[in-house]
Image: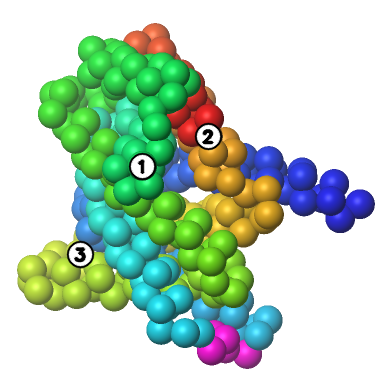
C-alpha cells in the first residue's frame, strides 16, 4: 500500500504543482496591470511563502533542525539562483509578454537542465533529446510569431525574460535534486532554507539599488501577489516532496510540472480576455515546448 501511495505521489505532486503554477501567472498579471513591479512581486511572494514554511516548521518540529553548513549552502544557492533570479525574470516576462506566453517560455527549463547534464556530467545527447531541443526551439519560434499574449504588443527579444527564468529554474532544480538525494534534509526544511535565502537576496538587492518604490505600489497589488505567494508555497512544497521520493527523478518530475503553461492558457483564456490574446500560435507554441520538455528529460 505504501508503495502504491508513493507511486501515485510521484505523479500527483508535480501535477498539483503544474496546476497551481499554471494559475499564479494570472494573479501576477493582474498585479502587474494594477501598478506592481517584478521586484515587488518577487519580494511579496517570497515573504509570504517563506513565512508559511517557517510557521509550519515551528508548528510541526519546534524549529529548523540542525543541519551541516554544506547542506544549508546547497539550498541557499538554489534559492538565490532558482528562486530569486528566476522569479525576477519570470515576473518581468509576465509584465512584458503576458501570462500565457511567459509561462510557455519558462517551461523551456528542461532544455537547460539537459545542457547542464551534457556539460557538467558528460551525458550524451540522445535522439529524444535532440528531437526535444528542436521541439522547444520550434515552440519558442511559434510563440514569437503568435501575435498572442499582451494586447499591447511585444517584441521577440522580450522572450529573453521567460527563457532566462527557465535557465535559472533549471540550475535551481538540479541543485535541489542533488541536495535532496545526497543529504538527510527533509522537503519542508529544504524549501524553508531555499526561500529564506531568496528573500535575503531580493531584500539585499532592493536595498543596494535603493528600490524603495516597491513599498509605494498600489495596495491591491499586494493582495494579488500575496495570494500568488500562498499558492506558490503549496506548489513548491509539492515539487520538493516529489523530488524527495525514491522514484522522484528529474526526468519524471520536471516534465509533469512543465505542463503548467497548458493550464495557464486555459486560465488566461477564461480570466484575462481584457488584457491578453490566446491565439492558435500561442497554443501551438506552448504544446511544442511541453512536448520538447518531455522528450529532453526522457
- Does the magenta run of residues contain 281? no
Which of the 4 image quadrants contains residue 218? bottom left
Disc 3: which residue:
214
Q: Earlier in the sequence, mark 2 or mark 1?
A: 1
Marks 3 and 2, Cα distance to the nearest angstrom? 34 Å
Residue at the (68%, 81%) spot, across then down: 60
Residue 162 in sight from this viewpoint: no
CA neighbours of label 1 inside 10 A, class few (<14), some (14 to 19), many (20+) = few
134 relative to 214, above or below? above
Indicate the secondary structure of the residue bearing disc 3: helix
Q: What is the x, y in percent for residue 80?
A: 30, 65
Residue at the (44%, 18%) spot, across then down: 127
> Is label 3 in contact with label 2 (beta carbons under 8 Å)?
no
Residue 111 in sight from this viewpoint: yes
Disc 2: which residue:
255
Q: Earlier in the sequence, mark 1 or mark 3?
A: 1
> Is label 2 in contact with label 1 (beta carbons under 8 Å)?
no
Front disc: 3 or 2: 2
Q: Nearer the viewer, residue 114 or 231?
A: 114
Q: What is the x, y in percent for residue 250?
A: 53, 45
Indicate the secondary structure of the residue bearing disc 1: loop
**Highlighted magenta segment, given as a residue range:** 62-66
Q: Nearer the viewer, residue 231 or 226?
A: 231
Image check: 8 left or right of 250? right
Q: What is the x, y in percent for residue 154?
A: 16, 25
Amino acid at each position: 500500500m505504501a508503495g502504491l501511495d508513493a507511486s501515485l505521489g510521484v505523479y500527483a505532486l508535480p501535477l498539483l504543482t503544474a496546476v497551481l503554477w499554471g494559475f499564479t501567472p494570472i494573479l501576477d498579471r493582474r498585479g502587474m496591470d494594477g501598478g506592481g513591479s517584478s521586484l515587488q512581486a518577487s519580494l511579496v511572494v517570497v515573504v509570504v511563502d517563506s513565512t508559511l514554511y517557517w510557521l509550519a516548521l515551528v508548528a510541526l518540529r519546534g524549529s529548523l533542525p540542525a543541519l551541516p553548513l554544506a547542506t544549508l549552502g546547497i539550498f541557499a544557492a538554489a534559492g538565490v539562483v532558482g528562486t530569486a533570479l528566476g522569479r525576477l525574470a519570470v515576473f518581468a516576462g509576465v509584465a512584458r509578454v503576458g501570462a500565457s506566453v511567459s509561462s510557455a517560455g519558462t517551461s523551456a527549463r528542461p532544455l537547460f537542465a539537459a545542457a547542464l547534464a551534457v556539460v557538467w556530467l558528460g551525458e550524451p545527447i540522445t535522439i529524444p533529446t535532440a528531437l526535444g531541443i528542436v521541439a522547444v526551439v520550434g515552440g519558442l519560434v511559434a510563440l514569437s510569431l503568435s501575435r498572442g499574449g499582451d494586447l499591447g504588443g511585444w517584441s521577440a527579444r522580450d522572450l529573453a525574460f521567460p527563457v532566462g527564468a527557465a535557465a535559472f529554474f533549471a540550475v535551481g532544480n538540479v541543485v535541489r535534486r542533488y541536495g535532496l538525494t545526497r543529504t538527510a534534509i527533509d522537503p519542508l526544511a529544504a524549501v524553508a532554507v531555499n526561500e529564506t535565502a531568496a528573500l535575503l537576496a531580493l531584500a539585499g538587492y532592493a536595498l543596494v539599488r535603493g528600490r524603495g518604490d516597491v513599498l509605494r505600489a498600489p495596495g491591491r497589488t499586494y493582495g494579488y501577489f500575496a495570494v500568488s505567494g500562498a499558492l506558490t508555497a503549496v506548489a513548491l512544497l509539492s515539487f520538493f516532496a516529489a523530488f524527495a521520493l525514491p522514484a522522484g527523478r528529474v526526468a519524471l518530475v520536471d516534465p509533469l510540472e512543465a505542463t503548467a503553461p497548458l493550464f495557464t492558457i486555459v486560465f488566461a483564456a477564461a480570466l484575462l480576455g481584457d488584457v491578453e490574446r490566446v491565439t492558435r500560435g500561442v497554443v501551438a507554441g506552448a504544446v511544442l515546448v511541453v512536448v520538447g520538455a518531455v522528450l529532453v528529460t526522457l
